[in-house]
Protein backbone atom coordinates (compact mmCIF):
# COMPACT_ATOMS: atom_id res chain seq x y z
CA UNK A 1 0.00 0.00 0.00
CA UNK A 2 1.28 3.44 -0.91
CA UNK A 3 1.26 6.33 1.55
CA UNK A 4 1.19 10.03 0.73
CA UNK A 5 3.20 12.02 3.29
CA UNK A 6 2.84 15.75 3.92
CA UNK A 7 5.70 17.05 6.03
CA UNK A 8 6.32 20.61 7.21
CA UNK A 9 9.46 22.53 6.43
CA UNK A 10 11.92 23.56 9.11
CA UNK A 11 13.53 21.88 12.07
CA UNK A 12 11.62 19.46 14.26
CA UNK A 13 10.74 20.73 17.77
CA UNK A 14 12.54 18.85 20.57
CA UNK A 15 9.29 17.27 21.76
CA UNK A 16 8.36 16.21 18.24
CA UNK A 17 5.42 17.09 16.03
CA UNK A 18 1.82 15.85 16.17
CA UNK A 19 0.88 13.42 13.42
CA UNK A 20 -2.39 12.80 11.64
CA UNK A 21 -3.53 9.79 9.67
CA UNK A 22 -5.91 11.45 7.20
CA UNK A 23 -8.25 9.06 5.37
CA UNK A 24 -9.84 10.21 2.12
CA UNK A 25 -13.53 9.91 1.35
CA UNK A 26 -15.39 8.59 -1.66
CA UNK A 27 -18.13 6.34 -0.31
CA UNK A 28 -15.71 3.40 -0.02
CA UNK A 29 -15.89 3.06 -3.82
CA UNK A 30 -13.79 5.94 -5.15
CA UNK A 31 -11.26 8.55 -4.06
CA UNK A 32 -7.51 8.87 -3.68
CA UNK A 33 -4.96 10.13 -1.13
CA UNK A 34 -4.36 13.30 -3.17
CA UNK A 35 -7.80 14.50 -2.08
CA UNK A 36 -5.97 15.70 1.03
CA UNK A 37 -4.99 18.81 -0.94
CA UNK A 38 -8.68 19.79 -1.00
CA UNK A 39 -9.22 18.85 2.62
CA UNK A 40 -8.93 20.46 6.01
CA UNK A 41 -5.78 18.46 6.74
CA UNK A 42 -3.42 20.35 4.44
CA UNK A 43 -3.46 23.42 6.68
CA UNK A 44 -2.49 21.29 9.68
CA UNK A 45 0.89 20.93 8.01
CA UNK A 46 1.31 24.60 7.08
CA UNK A 47 -0.11 26.22 10.21
CA UNK A 48 0.63 23.75 12.99
CA UNK A 49 3.63 21.76 11.80
CA UNK A 50 1.82 18.42 11.80
CA UNK A 51 2.94 15.45 9.73
CA UNK A 52 0.01 14.09 7.73
CA UNK A 53 -0.03 10.56 6.32
CA UNK A 54 -2.68 9.58 3.76
CA UNK A 55 -3.17 5.88 2.97
CA UNK A 56 -4.03 4.66 -0.51
CA UNK A 57 -6.39 2.08 0.96
CA UNK A 58 -8.10 -0.55 -1.16
CA UNK A 59 -11.50 0.50 -2.49
CA UNK A 60 -14.58 -1.68 -2.26
CA UNK A 61 -14.75 -2.44 -5.97
CA UNK A 62 -11.50 -4.40 -5.71
CA UNK A 63 -11.68 -5.52 -2.09
CA UNK A 64 -14.69 -5.10 0.23
CA UNK A 65 -14.61 -4.90 4.04
CA UNK A 66 -12.29 -5.45 5.92
CA UNK A 67 -9.59 -4.52 3.37
CA UNK A 68 -9.83 -0.74 3.81
CA UNK A 69 -9.85 -0.98 7.60
CA UNK A 70 -6.78 -3.21 7.70
CA UNK A 71 -4.97 -0.93 5.26
CA UNK A 72 -5.68 2.03 7.53
CA UNK A 73 -4.51 0.03 10.53
CA UNK A 74 -1.22 -0.71 8.76
CA UNK A 75 -0.82 2.98 7.89
CA UNK A 76 -1.37 3.80 11.56
CA UNK A 77 1.24 1.19 12.50
CA UNK A 78 3.64 2.87 10.08
CA UNK A 79 3.13 6.18 11.89
CA UNK A 80 3.87 4.56 15.21
CA UNK A 81 6.92 2.55 14.17
CA UNK A 82 8.44 5.40 12.14
CA UNK A 83 7.69 8.15 14.64
CA UNK A 84 11.37 8.91 15.28
CA UNK A 85 12.21 9.06 11.56
CA UNK A 86 9.24 11.34 10.88
CA UNK A 87 10.01 13.55 13.87
CA UNK A 88 6.58 13.02 15.43
CA UNK A 89 5.40 12.25 18.93
CA UNK A 90 4.19 8.69 19.24
CA UNK A 91 1.90 9.81 22.07
CA UNK A 92 0.05 12.26 19.81
CA UNK A 93 -1.12 10.24 16.83
CA UNK A 94 -4.46 11.56 15.58
CA UNK A 95 -6.85 10.22 12.97
CA UNK A 96 -9.30 12.06 10.74
CA UNK A 97 -10.95 12.16 7.36
CA UNK A 98 -14.11 13.03 5.54
CA UNK A 99 -17.15 10.97 4.50
CA UNK A 100 -16.16 7.29 4.11
CA UNK A 101 -12.74 8.28 5.42
CA UNK A 102 -14.49 9.47 8.54
CA UNK A 103 -16.35 6.19 8.77
CA UNK A 104 -12.98 4.46 8.64
CA UNK A 105 -11.71 6.92 11.26
CA UNK A 106 -14.44 5.86 13.68
CA UNK A 107 -14.02 2.17 12.82
CA UNK A 108 -10.25 2.38 13.29
CA UNK A 109 -10.64 4.00 16.72
CA UNK A 110 -13.00 1.20 17.77
CA UNK A 111 -10.74 -1.49 16.34
CA UNK A 112 -7.55 -0.19 17.98
CA UNK A 113 -9.30 0.13 21.34
CA UNK A 114 -10.69 -3.38 21.21
CA UNK A 115 -7.47 -5.13 20.15
CA UNK A 116 -5.31 -3.09 22.54
CA UNK A 117 -3.49 -1.71 19.53
CA UNK A 118 -2.24 1.75 18.69
CA UNK A 119 -3.44 4.46 21.05
CA UNK A 120 -5.13 7.34 19.22
CA UNK A 121 -5.02 10.74 20.89
CA UNK A 122 -7.81 12.51 18.98
CA UNK A 123 -10.29 11.74 16.20
CA UNK A 124 -11.69 14.12 13.58
CA UNK A 125 -14.44 12.34 11.61
CA UNK A 126 -15.96 15.05 9.41
CA UNK A 127 -19.50 14.31 8.16
CA UNK A 128 -18.85 10.59 8.63
CA UNK A 129 -20.39 7.69 6.72
CA UNK A 130 -21.29 5.44 9.66
CA UNK A 131 -24.69 3.85 9.20
CA UNK A 132 -25.50 1.20 6.60
CA UNK A 133 -29.18 1.55 7.50
CA UNK A 134 -31.31 4.51 6.48
CA UNK A 135 -31.57 7.35 8.96
CA UNK A 136 -33.94 10.28 9.07
CA UNK A 137 -31.54 12.34 6.95
CA UNK A 138 -30.21 9.64 4.59
CA UNK A 139 -33.66 8.31 3.65
CA UNK A 140 -35.13 9.95 0.52
CA UNK A 141 -32.24 12.39 0.32
CA UNK A 142 -31.78 13.94 -3.13
CA UNK A 143 -29.03 16.43 -2.33
CA UNK A 144 -26.09 16.98 -4.70
CA UNK A 145 -22.79 15.09 -4.38
CA UNK A 146 -24.06 12.26 -2.14
CA UNK A 147 -27.64 11.08 -1.75
CA UNK A 148 -29.74 8.04 -0.87
CA UNK A 149 -29.11 6.18 -4.12
CA UNK A 150 -25.34 6.63 -3.98
CA UNK A 151 -25.30 5.82 -0.29
CA UNK A 152 -27.08 2.51 -0.83
CA UNK A 153 -24.69 1.62 -3.65
CA UNK A 154 -21.56 2.48 -1.65
CA UNK A 155 -22.66 0.41 1.34
CA UNK A 156 -23.71 -2.53 -0.85
CA UNK A 157 -20.27 -2.66 -2.48
CA UNK A 158 -18.36 -2.25 0.78
CA UNK A 159 -20.36 -4.82 2.77
CA UNK A 160 -20.96 -7.38 0.04
CA UNK A 161 -18.79 -10.03 1.70
CA UNK A 162 -20.60 -9.89 5.06
CA UNK A 163 -23.18 -12.53 5.87
CA UNK A 164 -23.68 -11.89 9.58
CA UNK A 165 -26.39 -9.76 11.20
CA UNK A 166 -26.02 -7.22 12.58
CA UNK A 167 -23.15 -5.91 10.48
CA UNK A 168 -19.96 -5.60 12.60
CA UNK A 169 -19.28 -2.18 14.09
CA UNK A 170 -15.85 -2.16 12.43
CA UNK A 171 -17.71 -2.22 9.08
CA UNK A 172 -20.56 0.15 10.00
CA UNK A 173 -19.61 2.07 13.16
CA UNK A 174 -23.23 3.02 13.87
CA UNK A 175 -23.68 -0.59 15.00
CA UNK A 176 -21.29 0.01 17.92
CA UNK A 177 -22.77 -0.65 21.37
CA UNK A 178 -19.86 0.45 23.60
CA UNK A 179 -18.30 3.88 23.09
CA UNK A 180 -16.33 3.96 26.35
CA UNK A 181 -12.61 4.52 26.02
CA UNK A 182 -12.71 5.94 22.51
CA UNK A 183 -10.59 9.02 21.72
CA UNK A 184 -11.93 12.56 22.10
CA UNK A 185 -13.63 13.74 18.93
CA UNK A 186 -14.60 16.74 16.85
CA UNK A 187 -16.80 16.81 13.77
CA UNK A 188 -18.87 19.13 11.63
CA UNK A 189 -21.76 18.44 9.28
CA UNK A 190 -24.48 20.21 7.31
CA UNK A 191 -28.21 19.78 7.81
CA UNK A 192 -29.04 18.96 4.17
CA UNK A 193 -26.71 16.04 3.66
CA UNK A 194 -27.38 12.32 4.21
CA UNK A 195 -24.95 11.93 7.12
CA UNK A 196 -26.43 14.68 9.29
CA UNK A 197 -28.37 12.36 11.63
CA UNK A 198 -25.67 9.72 12.04
CA UNK A 199 -23.03 12.36 12.76
CA UNK A 200 -25.11 13.83 15.60
CA UNK A 201 -25.86 10.34 16.93
CA UNK A 202 -22.18 9.35 16.93
CA UNK A 203 -21.12 12.47 18.83
CA UNK A 204 -23.99 12.06 21.31
CA UNK A 205 -23.08 8.41 21.92
CA UNK A 206 -19.50 9.40 22.64
CA UNK A 207 -20.65 12.06 25.09
CA UNK A 208 -23.01 9.65 26.83
CA UNK A 209 -20.02 7.31 27.28
CA UNK A 210 -18.00 10.05 28.96
CA UNK A 211 -15.86 10.90 25.92
CA UNK A 212 -15.16 14.57 25.19
CA UNK A 213 -16.84 15.18 21.84
CA UNK A 214 -18.42 18.06 19.95
CA UNK A 215 -19.95 18.81 16.57
CA UNK A 216 -20.66 22.02 14.67
CA UNK A 217 -23.71 22.11 12.40
CA UNK A 218 -24.02 24.27 9.28
CA UNK A 219 -27.42 24.92 7.71
CA UNK A 220 -28.65 23.83 4.31
CA UNK A 221 -25.44 22.74 2.61
CA UNK A 222 -24.61 19.55 0.75
CA UNK A 223 -22.05 16.85 1.45
CA UNK A 224 -18.39 17.94 1.47
CA UNK A 225 -19.35 21.60 1.05
CA UNK A 226 -16.09 22.72 2.65
CA UNK A 227 -14.00 20.91 0.03
CA UNK A 228 -16.09 21.74 -3.03
CA UNK A 229 -16.96 25.35 -2.19
CA UNK A 230 -14.10 26.46 0.07
CA UNK A 231 -14.78 30.17 -0.34
CA UNK A 232 -18.32 30.08 1.04
CA UNK A 233 -18.84 31.87 4.34
CA UNK A 234 -19.80 28.62 6.07
CA UNK A 235 -16.84 26.78 4.54
CA UNK A 236 -14.44 29.37 5.92
CA UNK A 237 -16.19 29.20 9.27
CA UNK A 238 -15.98 25.40 9.29
CA UNK A 239 -12.27 25.48 8.43
CA UNK A 240 -11.54 27.98 11.21
CA UNK A 241 -13.48 25.97 13.80
CA UNK A 242 -11.78 22.74 12.73
CA UNK A 243 -8.34 24.31 13.11
CA UNK A 244 -9.23 25.75 16.51
CA UNK A 245 -10.26 22.30 17.76
CA UNK A 246 -7.08 20.78 16.35
CA UNK A 247 -4.95 23.42 18.06
CA UNK A 248 -6.64 22.69 21.39
CA UNK A 249 -6.07 18.97 20.87
CA UNK A 250 -2.38 19.64 20.23
CA UNK A 251 -2.10 21.04 23.75
CA UNK A 252 -4.42 18.67 25.59
CA UNK A 253 -4.82 15.29 23.85
CA UNK A 254 -2.15 12.63 24.33
CA UNK A 255 -2.18 8.83 24.27
CA UNK A 256 0.94 6.99 25.37
CA UNK A 257 1.84 3.89 23.35
CA UNK A 258 2.61 0.42 24.68
CA UNK A 259 5.54 -0.03 22.24
CA UNK A 260 4.76 -3.36 20.73
CA UNK A 261 4.38 -4.40 17.11
CA UNK A 262 0.84 -3.61 15.96
CA UNK A 263 1.08 -4.23 12.23
CA UNK A 264 -1.11 -6.58 10.26
CA UNK A 265 0.31 -7.89 7.02
Image: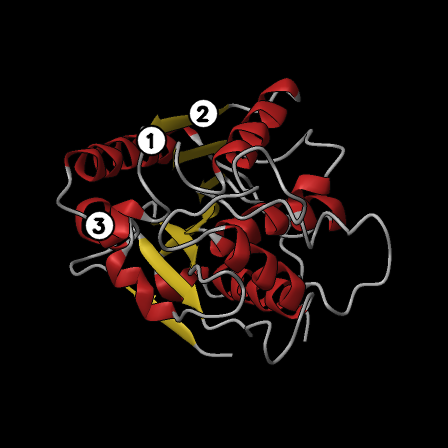
Cβ–Cβ under 8 Å for marks 2 and 1:
yes
Judging depth in this view, the residue of 194 and 139 nearest the camera is 139
Q: From the viewer's perspective, tell me whether residue 141 is left or right of residue 51.
A: right
In the figure, 260 relative to 256: above or below?
below
**Residue sticking out furthest to the right:** 164
Percent across and percent down for residue 51 are 32, 57
How many marks do you count on the picture? Answer: 3
Percent across and percent down for residue 212 are 52, 23
Judging depth in this view, the residue of 248 and 28 nearest the camera is 28
Q: CA distance from mark 2 to mark 1?
A: 9 Å
Which residue is painted at 27% across and 31% down in the image?
A: 241
Which residue is painted at 15% across and 34% down in the image?
A: 233
Give whichever of discs 2 and 1 has the lower sequence position. Answer: 2
Percent across and percent down for residue 94 are 45, 46
Which residue is painted at 77% across and 69% down in the image?
A: 161
Mark 3 crowdedness (10 Å alpha carbons): few <14, some 14-19, many ≥20:
some
Residue 263: tell me if it is visible.
no
Q: Quadrant of the C terminus?
A: bottom right
Give the label on residue 245, or none. Answer: 1
Residue identifier under label 3: 43
In the figure, 81 relative to 145: above or below?
below
Q: From the viewer's perspective, tell me whether residue 8 is left or right of residue 153.
A: left
Residue identifier under label 2: 214
Mark 2 crowdedness (10 Å alpha carbons): few <14, some 14-19, many ≥20:
some
Q: CA distance from mark 1 to mark 3?
A: 13 Å
Q: CA distance from mark 3 to mark 2?
A: 21 Å
Percent across and percent down for residue 238 are 26, 35
Quarter-of-image position of residue 106 = top right
- Give the structural element (helix, strand or loop) at label 2: strand
Give the label on residue 71, or none. Answer: none
Give whichever of discs 3 and 2 has the lower sequence position. Answer: 3
Amino acid sequence: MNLLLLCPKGSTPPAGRPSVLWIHGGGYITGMPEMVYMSRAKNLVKKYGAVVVCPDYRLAGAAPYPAALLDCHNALAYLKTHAAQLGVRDDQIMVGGESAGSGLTAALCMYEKDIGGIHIAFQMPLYPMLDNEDTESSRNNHAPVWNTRRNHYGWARYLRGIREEPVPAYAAPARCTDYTGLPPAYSFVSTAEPFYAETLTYIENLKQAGVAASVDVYPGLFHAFDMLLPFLKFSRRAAAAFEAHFERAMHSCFAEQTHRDSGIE
